[in-house]
Image: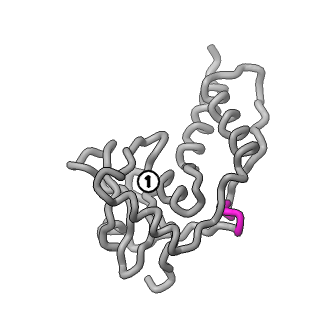
């Protein structure tokens, strides 16, 4: 896995259909959320072996960023146009997030590999471990924050978009 560099944000695709993210800290180690006592919805930030992070996967992915700390592959800033006149809570959440990104998106930056790993490592210390929350502070939020200073999760954004689409299609 020589193509992974110190400070890279990496992820693997798990069997349950989600992506698990971490910060590559060199020497075949990754800083990431690890399940706490086997509870799927809880976790602590630890530095583990790359092998443990991979969890049997043979493939992992590297997230690339532009010089402004934005993911190169698919980040959008404009609020999504609504396709019908009904607005529900999921629409409000997506619009609110898009507006937040639009007005406060400049707060992100691209931290150096050394800074990225340092930011991640600080949260492995006792008393500084950030609390896991599937929707507001998951492994993707944490890893992206280490690199850019902004907590975001494309997986959660896609899930909210899916809920919006489903709720719009349901005739009440």
Residue 94's x, y, as percent?
A: 65, 35
| Residue where numbered disc 1 is placed | 139
Q: Which residues are magenta?
A: 67-72
- 51 to 124, vertically: above or below: below
- Answer few, some or many: residues within 10 Å of disc 1's Cα (few below 14, many 20 plus, some between 14 and 19): many
Residue 109's x, y, as percent?
A: 65, 61
Residue 72's x, y, as percent?
A: 68, 64
Give the position of the N terminus as an image quadrant: bottom left
Give the position of the C terminus as an image quadrant: top right
Residue 68's x, y, as percent?
A: 71, 63
- 128 to 4, vertically: above or below: above
Where is residue 120, by image quadrant?
Answer: bottom left
Residue 5 at least partly seen:
yes
Residue 12 at least partly seen:
no
Residue 114 vs residue 44: left or right?
A: right
Q: Residue at x 66, y 38 (%)?
A: 97
- 40 to 12, vertically: above or below: above
């Amino acid at each position: 896995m020589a193509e992974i560099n110190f400070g890279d944000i990496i992820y693997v695709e798990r069997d349950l259909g989600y992506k698990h993210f971490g910060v590559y800290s060199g020497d075949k180690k990754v800083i990431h959320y690890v399940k706490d006592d086997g509870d799927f919805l809880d976790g602590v930030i630890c530095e583990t072996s790359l092998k443990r992070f991979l969890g049997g996967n043979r493939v992992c992915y590297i997230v690339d960023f532009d010089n402004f700390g934005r993911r190169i592959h698919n980040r959008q800033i404009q609020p999504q146009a609504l396709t019908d006149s009904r607005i529900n809570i999921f629409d409000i959440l997506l619009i609110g997030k898009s507006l937040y990104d639009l007005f406060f998106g400049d707060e992100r930056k691209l931290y150096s590999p050394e800074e990225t790993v340092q930011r991640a490592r600080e949260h492995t210390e006792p008393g500084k471990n950030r609390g896991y929350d599937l929707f507001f502070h998951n492994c993707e939020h944490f890893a992206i924050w280490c690199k850019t200073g902004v907590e975001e999760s494309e997986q959660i954004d896609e899930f909210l978009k899916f809920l919006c689409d489903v709720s719009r299609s349901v005739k009440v």
